[in-house]
Amino acid sequence: MKTCCDMRGYLTFLVLRLISKKPMSGEDIRQEIERRKGTKPSPGTVYPVLKGLHESEFIREISDGGKEKKYALTQKGKKELVVATKKFVAMFCDMQDDFTKRR
């Protein structure tokens, strides 16, 4: 079974986290990343991640009456997000000392 951290690392984790907050389209995700990071990823970056998450059954398409596809987490996706969050925290939070100046 693929895990989100195996597919595309940080971006996959970020997309899964964003969708966990509310259903989002690919464009919604691109705009949110731009708001948070200052640069807007290309569709060619975001949509393959969405495809991989969908194929892994971590997200599903939902209808909101609009033209854009929106995605929501599945139960499998919710479980994966818990696992991925633990991996992310274990991987990056122990590095805090590497980035703070010692006095």
Image: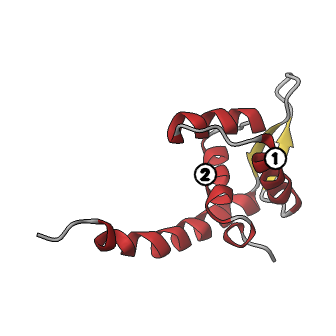
Q: Quadrant of residue 77?
A: bottom right
What percent of the width, then of the height, locates residue 26?
A: 77, 38
Q: Residue at x 88, y 24 (%)?
A: 67
Give the left or right position of residue 70, taking residue 40 as reference: right
Q: Residue at x 76, y 49 (%)?
A: 45
Assess disc 1: are there few (<14), some (14-19) or many (≥20) residues with their C-alpha within 10 Å of its C-alpha.
Answer: few
Residue 25 visible in the current orientation: no
Residue 29 visible in the current orientation: yes
Dividing the image into 4 quarters, which one contains the N terminus?
bottom right
What percent of the width, then of the height, locates residue 82?
A: 59, 65
Figure check: 97 above or below 68: below
Dividing the image into 4 quarters, which one contains the C terminus?
bottom left
Figure check: 29 above or below 13: above
Figure check: 12 above or below 39: below
Figure check: 29 above or below 11: above
Instruction: Indicate the secondary structure of the residue bearing disc 1.
Output: helix
* Residue receiving disc 1: 44
Disc 1 residue type (three-letter): Gly
Give the left or right position of residue 43, taking residue 40 as reference: right
Q: Quadrant of residue 85?
A: bottom right
Disc 2 residue type (three-letter): Arg
Give the left or right position of residue 90, taking residue 5 as reference: left
Among all residues in the image, which is located at the extreme top? Answer: 66
Q: Which mark is residue 17?
A: 2
Q: Quadrant of residue 74?
A: bottom right
Q: Which mark is residue 70?
A: none
Assess disc 2: are there few (<14), some (14-19) or many (≥20) residues with their C-alpha within 10 Å of its C-alpha.
Answer: some
24, 92: nearer the viewer: 92
Q: Residue at x 77, y 59 (%)?
A: 58
What percent of the width, then of the height, locates residue 39?
A: 59, 39
